[in-house]
Image (spheres, rainbow, N blue to C red):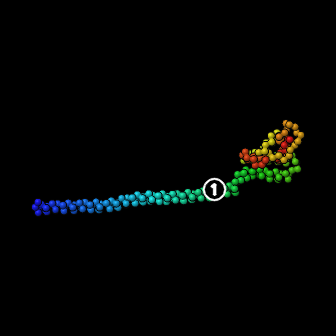
C-alpha cells in the first residue's frame, strides 16, 4: 500500500468515526429530548387526572352548596307554612259555625220577647240541628253507642253494670257523654256504662 492508499483509508476511517459520533450524538441528543418529552407527557398525564379531579371536586362543592341552600330555603318555607296553619288552621271551621252563632244570638233576643217555653225549645232544636249539620260538613261525626259492643278504640268505660244478663254482657248499656270522630280519627271517646 502506498501512502495515498493509507491516507485514503485513514480519511475513510476518520470520516466514518465522526459520522458514528454524530449519529451517537444525535441519538443522545434525541434521547434527552425524548426523555424530556416522555417525562412531560407523563407529567401531563399525571396532572390531567389531578386537574380533572380538582375540577370535579369544585363542581361537587358548588352542587353541595346549592343543595344545602335549597334545603335551607325549603325548611324555612315549611316552618312558615306550619306556623300559618297553626295560627289560621281553624279559619275554615270558625267561618262555618259563625251562622250558628248568629242563630243563637237571634234566639236569645227573641227569647227575651216571649214567655212561651215551646218556642224557645223549638228554636234551640233548630239551632242544634244546624250545628250538627255544620259539624258533619267539617268531617265530625258521632260515635254510635246504641246497642253497640264495647270497643276500647271508641268507648271509655266509666261504669260496669252487673246483672244485666248474658245478652247485655260486653255491650254498651248507657252513654254518659257522647264521643266524636274527625275523619275516622277519634277526637273524644264516648263515656259509657258497660254490662257485666
Relative to 32, 47 lies left or right: right
Q: Closest to the observer: 146 or 55?
A: 55
Look at mark 1 in the image and give the residue it sits on.
Answer: 78
The quadrant where residue 174 appears: top right
Q: Callout 1: 10 Å neighbours few (<14), some, many (20+)? A: few
Q: Residue at x 23, y 60 (%)?
A: 20
Q: How many marks?
A: 1
Q: Residue at x 86, y 50 (%)?
A: 114
Among all residues in the image, which is located at the extreme front?
Answer: 1
The quadrant where residue 70 appears: bottom right
Among all residues in the image, which is located at the extreme top?
Answer: 167
Relative to 150, 139 lies left or right: left
Q: Position of residue 173 (x, y in %)?
A: 85, 41
Relative to 118, 13 lies left or right: left
Q: Is residue 170 visible?
A: yes
Among all residues in the image, which is located at the extreme left?
Answer: 2
Q: Is residue 95 visible?
A: no
**36 up-or-down from 120: above or below:** below
The quadrant where residue 38 appears: bottom left
Q: Residue at x 83, y 40 (%)?
A: 170
Amino acid at each position: 500500500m502506498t501512502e495515498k492508499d493509507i491516507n485514503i483509508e485513514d480519511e475513510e476511517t476518520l470520516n466514518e468515526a465522526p459520522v458514528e459520533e454524530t449519529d451517537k450524538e444525535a441519538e443522545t441528543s434525541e434521547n434527552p429530548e425524548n426523555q424530556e418529552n416522555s417525562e412531560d407527557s407523563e407529567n401531563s398525564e399525571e396532572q390531567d387526572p389531578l386537574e380533572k379531579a380538582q375540577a370535579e371536586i369544585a363542581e361537587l362543592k358548588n352542587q353541595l352548596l346549592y343543595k344545602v341552600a335549597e334545603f335551607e330555603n325549603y325548611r324555612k318555607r315549611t316552618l312558615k307554612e306550619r306556623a300559618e296553619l297553626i295560627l289560621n288552621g281553624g279559619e275554615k271551621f270558625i267561618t262555618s259555625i259563625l251562622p250558628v252563632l248568629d242563630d243563637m244570638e237571634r234566639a236569645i233576643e227573641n227569647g227575651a220577647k216571649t214567655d212561651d217555653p215551646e218556642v224557645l225549645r223549638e228554636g234551640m232544636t233548630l239551632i242544634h240541628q244546624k250545628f250538627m249539620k255544620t259539624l258533619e260538613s267539617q268531617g265530625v261525626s258521632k260515635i254510635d253507642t246504641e246497642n253497640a259492643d264495647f270497643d276500647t278504640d271508641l268507648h271509655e268505660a266509666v261504669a260496669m253494670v252487673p246483672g244485666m244478663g248474658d245478652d247485655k254482657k260486653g255491650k254498651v248499656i248507657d252513654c254518659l257523654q257522647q264521643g266524636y270522630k274527625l275523619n275516622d280519627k277519634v277526637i273524644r271517646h264516648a263515656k259509657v256504662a258497660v254490662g257485666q
